[in-house]
Amino acid sequence: MAEKKPQTFANHACFDPPFHFFVLPIFLLGLIFSLIHFFAHITHGGFRDHFHAFLLILLALALLILALKVRLYTLRVQDRVIRLEERLRLTQLLSEPLRSRIPQLTEDQLIGLRFASDAEVAKLVERALNEKLSRKEIKQAIQTWRPDYWRV
């Protein structure tokens, strides 16, 4: 089995090819073509033709929204699991003064910290709390990247 490419800030974001390059484009094309069909035939045809064309637009829009919402729900559940996992990890790795401040970390900060190695996480938690670092700033500050290949 081939080794995975080491993950860094520059390459940690990824695409899900079936979703990003097939499902979304197909649903988007469906919406575009249904709009073209509706507006191309708006000047002629009866009420029934307009009604069917309008229903096609609604169906295409509903499918596109469904695809986006399913993706969003998946990411939200994953973020909740990451929050829990990081809180557990930090409870084990941090000394008491910082451990008691774990609840002060925002969701974005916890999600950013998941990439920090065990050796540098305490320093980054302290910086994140004191400097109110964003998820992106935390990721950029990481020296030793802890990869997450399971992100969807």
Image (cartoon, helix red, strand yellow):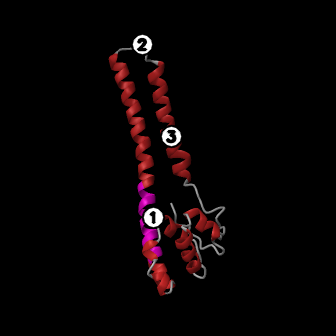
Mark 3 vs mark 2: in front: 2
Mark 2–mark 1 Cα distance, whole angstroms, equals 50 Å
**Badges 1 and 3: C-beta atoms under 8 Å apart?**
no
Residue linked to disc 1? 79
Decide which of tag 3 and tag 2 comes sooner along the chain. Answer: 3
Vertical side of 30 occupied by 16: above or below: below
Mark 2 vs mark 1: in front: 1
- Magenta residues, dominant SS class: helix
Residue at the front extreme, as displayed: 130
Q: Secondary structure at mark 1?
A: helix
Amino acid type of disc 2? His
Q: Residues within 10 Å of mark 1 (few under 14, many from 20)?
A: some
Q: Residue shown at 57%/71% (left/top)?
A: 115
Quadrant of the rendering where the N terminus is positioned:
bottom right
Residue linked to disc 3? 26
Side (left or right) of 43 relative to 142: left
Q: Residue shown at 66%/67% (left/top)?
A: 5
Task: Tell me the magenta residue range.
Answer: 73-87
The image quarter in which residue 126 lies: bottom right
Vertical side of 101 occupied by 44: above or below: above
